Image: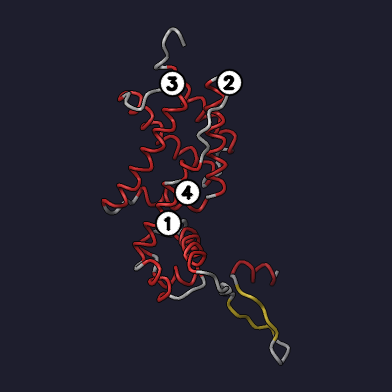
């Protein structure tokens, strides 16, 4: 029982010279890294903090402690908390570009299912990033953050239109896909955060819905 409580509280039990149990805080162990690796470590640590707390309630000291560094070092790399926040959110904006662009042979249904399967795998590997972005999207507080979201959504719209074989300049199709993106975010959150849907259920839901959007634009020859 004592061991379990120690794990939850993030402390370690030690034995004093008198033989009595004491505690000491378990701080992140600082490891010497090159500048690039240190920067990446700070971004990863920041994403974990931003995923569970609002931006306004997080201090620079808290972010530095999570990364196992100092406020001075964090500010040296990023300038301030806001710039670190934008850098961290910007990582999610690039996630769609990590998906393979190679066409999947077979019916459109196969291609759509493959895209969402890969997308959900990517989100699964970047859970904290997704949760932090979802939180930020609800409380976007300036134009720069709003523009970051807009650019990310636009890139994802292009990918969804492409998998349906629809032109990017089709205004109606783009509007429908844009509306669909709200569903993508909500469904993913129901799996990742609320645990009300399984990953497989989300994939099936998104696949069938996007195919239905594509069917609205099908021609008799299709």
Left or right position of 106 against 21: left
Name the element at disc 4: helix
Question: Image quadrant of residue 56?
Answer: bottom left
- Label for residue 221? none
In the depicted view, which residue is nearer to us: 165 or 176?
Answer: 165
Left or right position of 187 against 149: right
Crowdedness near tag 3: few (<14), some (14–19) or many (≥20) residues, C-alpha within 10 Å: many
> x, y (%) of residue 88?
42, 56
Q: Residue at x 47, y 58 (%)?
A: 47
Name the element at disc 3: helix
* Labels 2 and 1: the sequence-earlier one: 1
* Labels 1 and 3: the sequence-earlier one: 1
Label 3 sits on residue: 214
Q: Is residue 13 above or below residue 144?
A: below
* CA distance for labels 4 and 1: 11 Å
* CA distance for labels 3 and 2: 16 Å
Left or right position of 32 against 63: right
> x, y (%) of residue 31?
57, 73
In the depicted view, which residue is nearer to us: 84 or 196?
Answer: 84
* Labels 4 and 2: the sequence-earlier one: 2
Label 1 sits on residue: 88
* Labels 3 and 4: the sequence-earlier one: 4
Name the element at disc 2: loop
Question: Image quadrant of residue 15?
Answer: bottom right
* CA distance for labels 4 and 2: 31 Å
Label 2 sits on residue: 106
Quadrant in which the N terminus is drawn = bottom right
Name the element at disc 1: helix
* Labels 4 and 1: the sequence-earlier one: 1
| In front: label 4 or label 1 | 1
Q: Residue at x 51, y 39 (%)?
A: 99
Label 4 sits on residue: 130
């Amino acid at each position: 029982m004592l061991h379990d409580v120690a794990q939850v509280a993030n402390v370690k039990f030690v034995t004093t010279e008198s033989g009595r149990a004491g505690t000491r805080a378990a701080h992140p162990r600082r490891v010497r890294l090159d500048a690039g690796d240190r920067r990446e470590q700070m971004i990863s640590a920041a994403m974990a903090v931003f995923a569970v707390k609002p931006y306004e309630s997080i201090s620079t000291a808290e972010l530095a402690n999570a990364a196992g560094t100092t406020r001075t070092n964090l500010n040296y790399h990023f300038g301030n908390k806001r710039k670190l926040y934008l850098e961290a959110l910007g990582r999610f904006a690039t996630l769609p570009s990590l998906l393979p662009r190679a066409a999947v042979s077979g019916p459109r249904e196969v291609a759509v299912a493959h895209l969402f399967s890969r997308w959900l795998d990517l989100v699964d590997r970047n859970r904290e990033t997704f949760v932090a972005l979802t939180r930020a999207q609800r409380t976007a507080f300036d134009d720069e953050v709003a523009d970051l979201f807009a650019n990310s959504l636009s890139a994802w719209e292009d990918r969804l239109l492409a998998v349906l074989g629809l032109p990017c300049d089709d205004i109606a199709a783009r509007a429908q896909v844009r509306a669909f993106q709200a569903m993508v975010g909500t469904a993913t959150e129901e799996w990742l955060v609320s645990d009300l849907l399984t990953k497989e259920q989300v994939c099936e839901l998104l696949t069938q819905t996007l195919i239905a959007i594509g069917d609205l634009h099908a021609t008799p020859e299709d």
